[in-house]
Image (cartoon, rainbow, N blue to C red):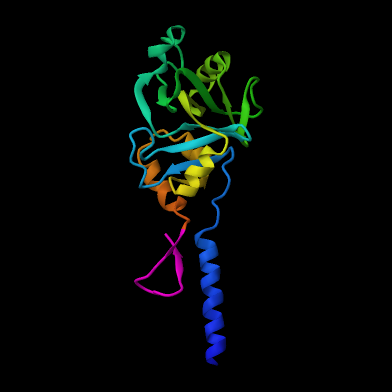
């Protein structure tokens, strides 16, 4: 192969790899998991998996799905004590408004006062929705105290900085009875940034983490 042609191919490959390496991350939207990267060390978000429930021009909202608290719903909602669903665990949904309970549930069709997260999964902060769902379908309902929130553009900046991975959400993961290990399971799936693998191909190759 002529030296000029080989040199041109190397330059083109290098340009492509650089484009992939510095490409903007996908935009956050409802129905995605936000998975903390390994470098996220703060106590609030370290090893968290967040389900994004709303994302628009005003900002982004989600709930942490893998942080159960030691409290059950019957501990904090007196009228539910002794009823079906009273033993349902409350999850720490995030640091914003922690005294407010939110309901995530599976249903067809949706209940009033709810927003669709993805097909068959809905989110609500209505007290009546919480009471109805937890008593009729406790295994397909999750209760969260508080939520996570970002102002417009804030989460996008954190994604560019490499604080988070975005992964397609799965209802089976959201409503799993045991949440231990969810973060460890999703971190490899979310590690889609391209990095230079110098030890194998020091000049021009990028591989998926």
- Give the vertical position of 157 relative to 202 (above or below): above
Tell me, yes or no, if residue 170 can be seen here. Answer: no
Assess whether residue 104 is covered by the magenta stretch. no
User: Which segment is the magenta one?
Assistant: 194-209
Q: Which quarter of the figure is the C terminus placed in?
A: bottom left
| Residue 94 spot, x, y in % from top left | 43, 28
Residue shown at 51%/22% (left/top)?
Answer: 102
Tell me, yes or no, if residue 167 can be seen here. Answer: yes
Quarter of the rendering containing residue 46: top left
| Residue 153 spot, x, y in % from top left | 56, 39
Residue shown at 45%/65% (left/top)?
Answer: 207
Nearer the observer, 42 or 69: 42
| Residue 179 spot, x, y in % from top left | 39, 36
| Residue 125 spot, x, y in % from top left | 55, 20
Q: Residue furthest top?
A: 79
Nearer the observer, 134 or 160: 160
Helix, strand or loop for the magenta stretch, by majority? loop
Q: Left or right: where does residue 178 sit relative to residue 149?
A: left
Q: Which quarter of the figure is the N terminus placed in?
A: bottom right
Residue shown at 51%/59% (left/top)?
Answer: 22
Nearer the observer, 136 or 120: 120
Residue shown at 53%/74% (left/top)?
Answer: 13
């Amino acid at each position: 192969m002529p030296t000029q042609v080989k040199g041109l191919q190397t330059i083109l490959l290098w340009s492509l790899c650089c484009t992939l390496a510095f490409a903007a991350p996908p935009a956050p939207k409802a129905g995605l998991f936000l998975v903390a990267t390994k470098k996220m060390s703060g106590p609030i978000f370290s090893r968290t998996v967040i389900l994004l429930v709303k994302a628009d021009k005003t900002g982004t909202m989600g709930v942490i799905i893998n942080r159960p608290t030691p409290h059950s719903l019957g501990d904090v909602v007196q009228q539910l004590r002794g009823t079906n669903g009273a033993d349902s665990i409350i999850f720490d949904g995030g640091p914003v408004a922690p005294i407010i309970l939110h309901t995530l549930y599976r249903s067809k069709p949706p209940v009033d006062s709810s927003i669709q997260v993805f097909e068959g999964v809905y989110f609500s902060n209505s007290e009546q929705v919480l009471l109805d769902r937890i008593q009729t379908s406790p295994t397909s309902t999750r209760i969260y105290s508080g939520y996570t929130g970002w102002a417009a553009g804030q989460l996008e900046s954190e994604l560019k900085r490499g604080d988070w991975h975005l992964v397609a959400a799965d209802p089976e993961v959201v409503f799993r009875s045991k949440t231990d290990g969810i973060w460890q399971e999703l971190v490899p799936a979310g590690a889609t940034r391209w990095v230079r693998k110098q030890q194998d191909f020091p000049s021009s190759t990028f591989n998926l983490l």
